[in-house]
Image: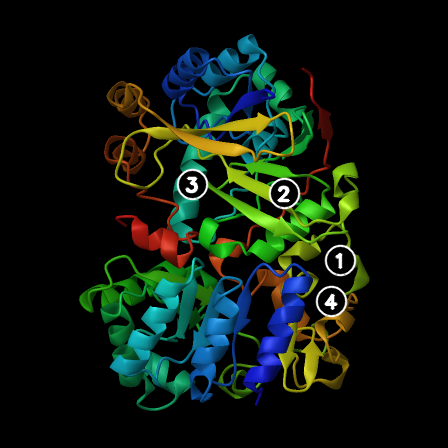
Amino acid sequence: MTGQTRIGLFGGVYSNALALRALLQDAGMRGLDRLYCLGDLGAFGPYPDRVCEVLRATGIPVIQGNYDHSLGNGLADCRCGYTDPRDNYFAKLSYDYTFSRTSTGHKCWLAQLPAELRLTIGPWRVLLCHGSPRKTNEFLWETATSDAFLAWLFKRYECDVIVATHTGLPWAREVTVQAGCQAHAAQADGVPRSGWFVNCGAIGRPANDGRTTVIYAVLSLPHTMLRKPEVKFVRLAYDHERFAGEMRAEGLPEEFVQTILTGWWTTCNEILPAKERARGRY
Amino acid sequence: MMSLAQVEDHVRKAVELGVKEFYFTGGEPFLHPQIEQMLSAALAVGPVTVLTNATRFTPERVAALARLRDASPYSLELRTSLDGFSSETNDPIRGWGSFQRILHGIRLLLEGGFLPIITAMRSWPVDQDEAQLAGFRNLLAAMGYRYPRMKLLPSLKLGQEVRRDRGYAEHEYLTESMMAGFDPGHLMCSSGRIVSARGVHVCPILVDWPDSYLGASLHEGQAQYTLRHQACLTCYQFGALCANASSSAPSLEQTRRHGRDPS
């Protein structure tokens, strides 16, 4: 029996330093080989410098999300991709708060983060990105992303595993990638092979499921192609009541606080596809 | 009118090309006798949005749509046109008596567990959006749609809008200098194609213009298109008009920097 590498993947930190610390502890207890952060460090929560400090101290590789790109480059908004006026109103409140409270040093650090990271782990070509491999703020929702499109991504970007976070809702899917289209050596036999897409969720706010826990992903990559990669979503409990108190102390919108306390998204719902929307409360 | 076999063939080809999602528009898609089989073929392989006037729904049809929705792992979106929150504002645009018929259709959809996206053409100045949206939301909330999904569309100065409002002025064209630094990702024609009974077109708005025809099959219809029509100006100004919010995002305009694994 050959070994495997287990990596922890998280994103959508949204200034939630308490959840980030809980994650580091949890990952340590699980004995994960490595951790990767897929971006969007700010937004939503209070004291944005705290998560930058923690992440920079740990040396965990971080990919640049749309929020990090905007903060780092001094843009006027977060480029979150919302289209509804109410969603944009809250996005702006949150961005203005985060922008004014992120130190210049951290902004410079955010500005130079890479937009993607390619890893080779055993036989697996892994592509870590924020939204999709082709666009940092592209939404890839579980019920609005076809197998055909995912297969196209695996071929176009020459990889076996793609991990993203942008939408904040965790999901994973194995798709068949047409034979004969890949550069990978193991493909020479012409046998159809699979690609694995993973959205690792977000640790900054709950997954709109009525639970206060937040989610990250553990990806187990066997050192042989005879076994498949496995994805496990970890529900992380943290001191969410303390976090809600910190948000209130900083004057952040009560709508955001309610999301932390109830597990239901109160804002940014207009971008959800029908099935994801129907699962939420609002 | 497209046949079921034509639709199935295009769906197959779209899958080969890596299609992300499908939209059905018309005319009115629900006038087609085989629309449910068409939706079923598309929902088997990807998410589907139908743009409908919502006036053809019966409880039986909505039940059939709910079965299609529940059988697919993908979302089935029903986008319903309603151009005002009263007969007085909607009917001059959508036809006399249409307001009540549309509300009846929306009610049936809600009873079937659907969350239709109510699509309104902006027939008012942009700065009135909030007040207008509040009017729509109040109307829909009173029907039991507590958190209605809304999409505002700009008015394309074509067809009956020329009579109702105005047509494009002679100078209203895109120029090359306007395209400098513009992200074509905003435009549906950068990533989408329309198929009709005649073949493949660049855009649903321009489907009747001969120069929007790109070929018989999707494989032939991949060429880039120069934005030469006046309607292109509205897409340029307001972004991808036809997409749902869940699939559109403004450009990040970032230079991609490729990282290496530091470990």
Same chain, marks 4 and 3? no
In the depicted view, which residue is nearer to us: B17 or A223? Answer: A223
Q: Amino acid at mark 4?
A: Leu
Q: Quadrant of residue A20?
A: top left
Residue B133, position as x, y percentages in the image:
34, 62
Q: Amino acid at mark 3?
A: Leu
Quarter of the C terminus of chain B within the rendering: top right
Looking at the image, is B8 positioned above or below residue B244?
A: below
Residue at image mark 1: B179
Q: Residues within 10 Å of mark 1 (few under 14, many from 20)?
A: few
Pick whichever of labels 2 and 4 is earlier in the sequence. Answer: 4
Disc 2/disc 1 C-alpha distance (Å): 16 Å
Q: Amino acid at mark 1?
A: Met
Q: Quadrant of residue A67?
A: top right
Looking at the image, is B52 positioned above or below residue A33?
A: below
> Answer yes or no: do the residues labelled 3 and 1 have beta carbons within 8 Å?
no
Q: Amino acid at mark 2?
A: Leu
**What residue appears at the point 46 percent right and 72 percent down from the top-left corner?**
B40
